[in-house]
DNA sequence: TACGTTCCGGAAAACCTTTTCGGTACGCCT
DNA sequence: AGGCGTACCGAAAAGGTTTTCCGGAACGTA
């Protein structure tokens, strides 16, 4: 079982040519006769030869690998980004090193060192929450920051368009004839919460509408807060006809209390969430309209940008990826 | 920015020694004077030298990498396993290649080929669902199957003890004085569903109890099924005092209908779930007792087994990892 | 026949590190 | 003084591949 892998030397020997010709034959170089090429290829197949990528990397100065440095795998936002990136790279010849720093700074440094030692061709840094994070600084390889942008504007970052997402949600409610729209969202220290609220308020202002409930209800990203805030909101303003929740978790809490209060969704009150966290949104009662951040596309995009940067030169600044509206049954036209 | 990495040659030159001595100095070999060693180390630090792992791997015949081949990253079960494995390897010097086959067979083959070409030292195959999957066959490196066992008993597989988990859940309910226990679970074609039911029934039998509701309610792994099954169950047998749900999703549906029917949880009916999917279990009303499969530990264990197998020899057969009871408020003693 | 072209295949360097082995210098003993 | 052991350092091979360059053969032309 632990037989040493076959080398090009053995393939060459079996085909009766030199190592050099064998290499050229397998790599499609022109300076080799068709008949010899066939012989080499057959020999390679017969021995089940696969070239040693380490040796290749040594001479080409390209390892064909990239590092995916995430702050927390647990967080559900990292996963789709990873998937997108892995997918995009997979179709090229590059493999992906997965490193989870678990939010620990020294662990991140440690992983970074290891990755550089492995001569990765590039790096994608995936943040845990969508707020700016410290830059890794000058590195011998291109780096792309995904989800959480770098604090250094000289780096290239890819982030979600949370402002556009908030706008999208409220726009959807307005188009369905809603006029008394409230906004319950998460932790005010999150840039994402601020941005989504900003987008929502901007769209309301365009329509000449005021926010129902007198304020943006910041709290935390939990179902429990969704329940609590909704109770307070209904006390303050029983006449609302729509709620924009800052996350699907919060939206679940909102739905729960609306049911308790015998308010029908969506005929009396429309509810829209954020994240399109399928397990929560699709299984809600009724299924929840929500905003999808296109995280997988963000990951794919990061991979593409990185791929372009390898060998070429890297841009800088922050690029935003638009959100997408997912309509289910929790929103519907009035009447 | 794209400066070529520093090599040992440059370090040696700066320290005024040969490449060989520089290598020995940095690797703690004894045949080098302390003063020279210091000089080399200082030179290495000054140049920020990090050894080229590709070159190292070429001579030592160890790449210091392993492949993590998952069938679907999306599935929430893979993630904790990945985390555990990544964590365990991280503390060694091994890095992890992440490959997502997306349930596609040809993609899996493609990734496998790429990984072998990169001369990984070993492989962990993480399945999407806990049923046996085809073996990858004889490979030049040790392979460990996690979560989904291999069909070939000659391979080494690590799986969840679902039977024990089912037993654990029912045992907990019994200890709390419950006697009329029903079981609502997911897709009957899943081995996990069968096993959990088997464990549950075995524990009931030990106590001389019958399953309430006359049958195991197989359906699918959704909240909606949890709701539907609970309605049917209550019609069939309104006197139940506990429900063992095959997943936390299903448990959420169960809770929902119990609320609608004005049955208090846990005083009238206790509910226990499975998976300890935090977002669902901890935020339920009331917070859900559940069974945790210790997936992260399973991943860690897989890493350890693989690490032991590298260089050594690999065992075979199927090893099970026990489940763990998580008590929250949805279960409590009767009265 | 002599010479220039074209086409193929091979020898060897290069990538970067580890490790073995041989060599030098020095102190010690006889 | 000569021999020997020890401590330290360097030269060189090895690992597997790519690529450059060169040599030889075949062929056509003068």
Image (tube, coloured by chain):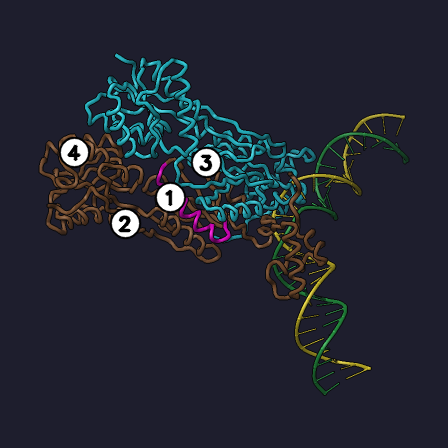
Chain colours: A cyan, B brown, C green, D yellow
Q: Write down the chain letter for disc 1.
A: B
Residue A208 locus on image (x, y percent): 38, 13
Distance from disc 4 to disc 3, alpha carbons, whole Å, reads 39 Å
- Frontmost residue, B288 versus B189: B288
User: Disc 4, disc 3: CB below 8 Å?
Assistant: no
Residue corresponding to mark 1: B80
- In the picture, measured across the screen, residue A40 lies left or right of residue A233, that is right
How dense is the environment of label 4, judged by Cα within 10 Å: few (below 14), some, or many (20 and up)?
Answer: many
Q: Which residue is mark 4?
A: B258
Where does the magenta region start and end? B75-94
Q: Nearer the viewer, mark 4 or mark 3?
A: 4
How far across and how far down the image is residue B77, in percent? 35, 41
Chain identity of mark 4: B
Question: Is residue B216 at all visible to an observer of this figure?
Answer: yes
- Residue at (12, 48) in percent of width and height: B177
Q: CA distance from mark 3 to mark 2?
A: 29 Å
Both on one chain, marks 2 and 1? yes
**Alpha-carbon span between mark 3 and mark 1:** 14 Å
Residue on which the image places disc 2: B324
């Amino acid at each position: 079982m632990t037989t040493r892998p076959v080398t090009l030397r053995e393939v060459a020997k079996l085909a009766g040519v030199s190592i050099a010709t064998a290499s050229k034959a397998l790599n499609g170089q022109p300076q080799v006769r068709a008949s010899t090429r066939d012989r080499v290829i057959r020999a390679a197949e017969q021995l089940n030869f696969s070239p040693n990528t380490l040796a290749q990397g040594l001479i080409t100065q390209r390892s064909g690998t990239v590092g995916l440095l995430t702050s927390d795998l647990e967080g559900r936002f990292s996963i789709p980004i990873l998937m997108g990136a892995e997918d995009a790279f997979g179709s090229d010849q590059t493999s992906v090193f997965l490193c989870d720093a678990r939010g620990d700074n020294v662990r991140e440094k440690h992983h970074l060192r290891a990755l550089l030692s492995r001569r990765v061709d590039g790096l994608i840094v995936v943040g845990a929450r969508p707020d700016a994070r410290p830059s890794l600084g000058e590195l011998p390889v291109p780096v792309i920051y995904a989800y959480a942008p770098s604090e250094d504007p000289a780096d290239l970052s890819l982030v979600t368009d949370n402002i556009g997402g908030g706008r999208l949600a409220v726009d959807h409610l307005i188009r369905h004839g809603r006029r008394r729209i409230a906004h319950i969202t998460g932790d005010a220290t999150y840039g994402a919460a601020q941005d989504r609220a900003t987008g929502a308020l901007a769209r309301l202002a365009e329509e000449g509408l005021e926010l129902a409930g007198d304020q943006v209800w910041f709290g935390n990203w939990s179902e429990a807060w969704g329940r609590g805030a909704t109770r307070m909101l209904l006390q303050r303003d029983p006449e609302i006809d729509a709620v924009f929740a800052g996350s699907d978790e919060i939206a679940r809490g909102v739905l729960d209390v609306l049911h308790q209060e015998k308010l029908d969704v969506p005929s009396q009150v429309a509810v829209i969430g954020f994240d399109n966290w399928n397990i929560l949104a699709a299984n809600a009662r009724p299924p929840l309209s929500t905003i999808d951040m296109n995280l997988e596309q963000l990951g794919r995009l990061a991979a593409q940008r990185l791929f372009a940067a390898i060998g070429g030169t890297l841009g800088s600044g922050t690029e935003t990826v638009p959100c997408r509206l997912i309509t289910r049954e929790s929103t519907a036209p009035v009447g």
